[in-house]
Amino acid sequence: MKASELKLETPFESPNTPTPSEEQIPKTETVVRSSRGSWNLINLDELWRYRELIYFLCWRDIKVKYKQAAFGVAWVVAQPLFTMVTFTFLFGRVAKMDSEGLPYSAFSFCALVPWNYFVSAINRGSLSLAGSGALFSKVYFPRLVIPIASVMAGLLDYVIAVGTLVLVLGWYGYYPQVQWLLGIPALTCSMVALACALSFWLGALNVKYRDVGHLLPFFVQLWMFLTPIVYPLSAIPKRFHLWAKLNPMTGIIEAYRSVFFNRICDWQALGISLAMTVCLLISGMFYFAKTERKFADIV
Amino acid sequence: MKHSIEVNGISKEYLIGKQIHNPYETLRETLARGITTLPKKLLHPGLLKTPTTESLWALKDVSFSACPGEVIGIVGKNGAGKSTLLKILSRITDPTEGEMRIRGRLASLLEVGTGFHPELTGRENIFLNGALLGMRKAEIKAKFDEIVAFSQVEKFIDTPVKRYSSGMYVRLAFSVAAHLDPDILVIDEVLAVGDLAFQKKCTGMMQNVANQNRTVLFVSHNLHLIRTLCSRVIMIEGGRIVQDGETEAVLPRFIRSLQARGDVSEANLKARNLWGKRSVRIDQVVLKNKQGELSWSFPVKESIVLQLNFHVIEPADGLTVTLLLSNPLTGEIVTTVKEMVTPSVIAVGNEKTMVLELPQVPLRPGDYGIQINLANGKGDQIYDWVGKEADLPFLSVTSDELDPEKRQGYFSMPSLIKESRL
């Protein structure tokens, strides 16, 4: 991106730029009213107009994260691998956890990769709003951009981790198949949506009650053990299955395994998970819209 | 012509002061309070509406509208509500009451360099900051060269901004904002940055925006700048618009309001930063003309009498007074007056006074910023400083001369024609 190359771009190609010929066109009118006591909706149009800001914020997070780390991307591969080795030793060897006949390393790693992404996404997404006070008090943009960008910024790490996972599975003799190409992106999308939904809720709550930020690590740890990551769903007694499936991550993690190991998918678990994601996403957006206009005053 | 901004009855309430419950209460406290007060609420539904906090109306019933092409200055004392108004206009915070309509793209510059990340390079920050201000990527690309040229940091564009000098940082940040091409530009006092040449560039930019039939709203304490740029001024006091009209009609009223005795002594002097050793504290700054009338405005060659009322907290080792006059546009010091009041020790006590006279002030017509400090007898240890943040009114030197050439410079040198062969 040399300055000289940039000149090749057609100036004013964006519809938002007023050019002399556009002066006659009626300009967009923004009406701001007191929000007291009314329920607002998220302005999705506006959010769409600011989509590039989401991109720039993600890109900033990624750049800053790796700018001064000597090994850069190596950490992304090392972290889940290290966890996998620890878990394989602890749960696979010592505790002799059942892994449905699969090699324990492969079994736990293909749950750890999505789970690690999910945890870092909700952590960052929930804390991002409270950390953006300086921006909120100085410039206007749709506030929803902040948690969305934080959730998305982890995707690069996730993609690299999935690449590592493919290599590890290859080592154990599970080679890429067609359903991986469909299944992985689809499951990633549903996980991103769930992470966004939780970040809207927890992020907006955290602006008002910083307790959320303190509770989050415990909550996440507890959640990890309630999700079939180090153990298979089949290890839980049958009568508790429905309860386990009410955890939206159960369906997603089990579905990842069924994609990677070419097994039958538990559609019931995945369906519950999707339904919960949609509910959380819509309610999260309502709650966010209700509180976002106060952020600048209380952050 | 259609208005670009219409503001109807905007009010903003902030909760402050004595509060029955803590606004930063924890989740546990909220839940506990909710549960403990629930029976009471159920029994007496009327109590639901009782105010739980004391509130402050930062703005009350503010209405105005602006047309494209207008440059409007907003003036008011510290805490009058100017910044709150700008925040509401920029949609950062919500009005508690009222409604406003904005036609076109509004850009606000409440701070220079919002969202700049120190680890990123100048180039990266241009894109990030531009996107935050609402520019599209393609638009930033198209204007990239212009932005860099305007900021004069070409050489360092690929250096992380944490290595920039503060001047470079500010220039780059301002340049991004200057290329926003908004229909409405809202600016808080951000022009008080950069060197003189860059400030001129910025004022030029604002003038351009207005010439292109856009609206500029800007807050400044720099009356000279307001006089140069604005055709219309809105004066705010206590959260209300007290006057809205032509610059030359509103500014005198604003200056008079600053000159009211109470203002200079109480609000501003109390709000100022504590600076120096603090053995002596200035309570009041009074300017008078030869006749002893209070005034901050003097005709050319008139005498000025400066009276300082102060109290002594610890015994002071002598007293020296220094008066600095500065150019309000650049902050450049025009002249310094320094006089020793006494070399001997001053005892602790209240209601002390000193009077300094400046006979036949040779300043050229214009506004001059005033800073005052009191130091010890040797003048090497400052006791109290009334600086820029005290918001003292400007000292205006007026003249009815019409010769514009004579307005240049700061001083009138005595001169006379000694001889001429004609």
Image (cartoon, coloured by chain):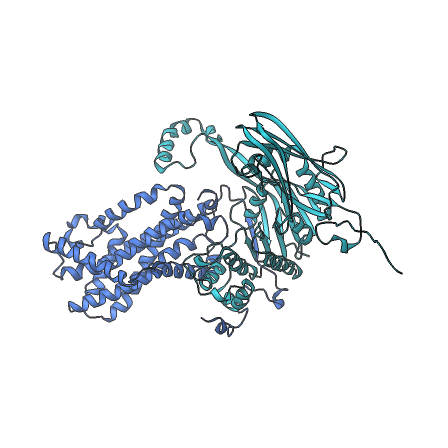
Chain colours: A blue, B cyan
- Comparing B305 with B220, the one in front is B305
Does residue A195 appear to the left or right of A41 in the view shown? left
Examine the rendered structure and indicate whether residue A203 appears above or below residue A111.
above
Return the x and y of residue A170 as percentages of the image width and height. Answer: 18, 69
A109 left or right, relative to A62: left
Q: Nearer the viewer, residue B336 or B60?
A: B336
- Give the answer, above or below, for where A205 lies relative to B118: above
Residue A214 on image: x %, y %: 32, 43
Q: Quadrant of residue A69?
A: bottom left
- Let me know if residue B66 appears in the view: no
- Vertical side of A134 occupied by A149: above or below: below
Q: Determine whether A227 is above or below B256 in the image.
A: below
Q: Judge by depth and name the residue closer to the eye, A50 or B8.
A: A50
Residue found at the far right of this picture: B422
Residue A59 appears in the figure: yes
Which quadrant would the C terminus of chain A be assigned to in this image? Answer: top left
Residue that appears at 41% across and 54% down: A146
Image location of residue A230, percent across then percent down: 18, 54
Residue A265, position as x, y percentages in the image: 22, 61
Q: How many marks?
A: 0
Front-most of A120 and B144? B144
Screen quadrant of the N terminus of chain A: bottom left
